[in-house]
Amino acid sequence: MIDLSPKMTEALNQQISYEGYASSFYLALAYWCDIQALQGCKKFFLRQSDEERMHMLKLYEYMSEAGVQPMTPALPQPPIKYKSIQEAFHKVFEQERSVTAAIHNLLKLSYEENDFNTQNFLQWYVDEQREEEAVIRTILDRIKVIGEGGQSLYYIDKEVDKINIQVVAAEKTVGGV
Ligand code: FEO
């Protein structure tokens, strides 16, 4: 049986709002990319937005299993404009780092509270964040190599599209589909 303390309940609700914000952040970014004609990046961020929604829903299900009604938070407005795709990916990295820090704090709390079920549940998020950060780091490295010349946007978009295909293929392999 899952027994969530009031403190843990509040912290999980807070995480719901972070994951919800992340989903909306990526959705807004996907349509900024659309306007810039960066279709590879748009696809990447739309998939990412769906992933973040799934992260949020997993928290809903976990809390519901514990007999607690999750909060559905009002979310802050995400950015809708960027100076460049380079800046956008740097912001994405900051965004993911902040979610990683929040997950680590949640995990710390679960240890303090001897909440073994939540510790176990959160391990999936620790792995997921590590993978997401690795993908964004790879993209940032490629952006650095491509540089900022005349056709850089074209090549960045192609690279992001390629990475998108690899991530989807890796998910299918892990999921056994
Ligand atoms: Fe679910 Fe990437 O934060």
Image (cartoon, rainbow, N blue to C red):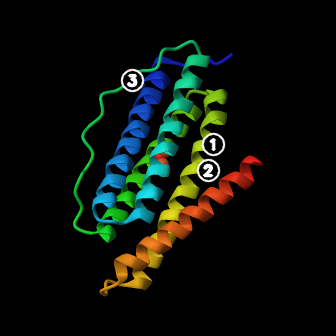
What's under tag 3, amino acid-wise?
A: Thr
152, 19: nearer the viewer: 152
Occupied quadrant, residue 167: bottom right
Q: Indicate which disc, 3 or 2, sits on the residue closer to the N terminus.
A: 3
Residue 83 location (% of width, % of height): 22, 67
Left or right placement of residue 150 versus residue 98 in this view: left
Q: Which quadrant holds the N terminus? A: top right
Q: Are marks 1 and 2 in contact (CB under 8 Å)?
A: yes
For residue 100, above or below residue 41: above
Nearer the observer, disc 1 or disc 3? 3
Query: For the image shown, how many numbered marks are present on the structure?
Result: 3
Q: Which residue is mark 3?
A: 72
Q: Determine if the C-beta at disc 3 is less than 8 A from ligand 1.
A: no
For residue 142, above or below residue 93: below
Q: Residue furthest top?
A: 67
Q: Determine if the C-beta at disc 1 is less than 8 A from ligand 1.
A: no
Q: Which residue is mark 1?
A: 124
What's under tag 2, amino acid-wise?
A: Asp
Occupied quadrant, residue 36: bottom left
